[in-house]
Image: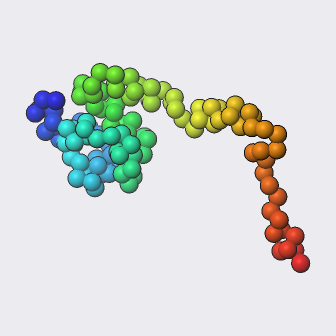
Amino acid sequence: MSPEVESKPLADLGLPPRVLNALKSRGIERVGQVLVMDPADLLSIRNFGPQSKKDLWDKLAEFGYLPSGEEGEAAAESDGSGDTLDVLEDMVPAISSLPSGEGELLEDEDEDDDQS
């Protein structure tokens, strides 16, 4: 990573204020700091969720700061892949393969006691 990229202020990328504020709250103000971080660590920052990560990755890709291969990750996230519906659809086969009786809801045994 060139010193220019490493020292480039994130504010120069045109990111939304909520993204900049979340990153600043952790002392992250330069492109180089973001590029060496694990994406999971970014998501652990308060007020920095998947949309913030997408916004950040889109801007980094736009400026050519993402290593090759990660630009595709930003595009995949922007097209909605990996959303909640996809996760749930992936779970259906796993749930339907449970042996009979497993995975069923159990009745609350204390309900009868509360009605006395």
Q: Is residue 86 above or below residue 42?
A: above
Identify which residue is drawn at 38% across, 54% down: 46
- Where residue 26 sits: x, y (%)? 27, 54
Q: Quadrant of residue 2?
A: top left
Q: Nearer the viewer, residue 93 or 87?
A: 93
Image coordinates of residue 10 in percent, x first then y, are 22, 41
Q: Is the N terminus in the top left, top right, bottom left or bottom right quadrant?
A: top left
Q: Is residue 85 left or right of residue 7?
A: right
Does the rendering let one see residue 10? no
* Residue displayed at 51% across by 29% down: 81
Residue sitting farthest toward the front? 99
Q: Is residue 65 above or below residue 100?
A: above
User: In the displayed structure, does residue 16 sit left or right of residue 31?
Assistant: right
* In the displayed structure image, the side of residue 112 where residue 82 appears, left or right: left
Farthest bottom residue in view: 116
Count of numbered badges drawn on the protein: 0
Nearest the viewer among 102 and 27 is 102
At x 22%, y 42%, the residue is 33
Give the image location of residue 85, x and y in percent: 61, 35
Which image quarter is the C terminus in? bottom right
Judge whether residue 56 can be spotted in this image: yes
Residue 90 x %, y %: 63, 31
Along the viewing direction, whichever of 95 and 11 lies nearer the viewer:
95
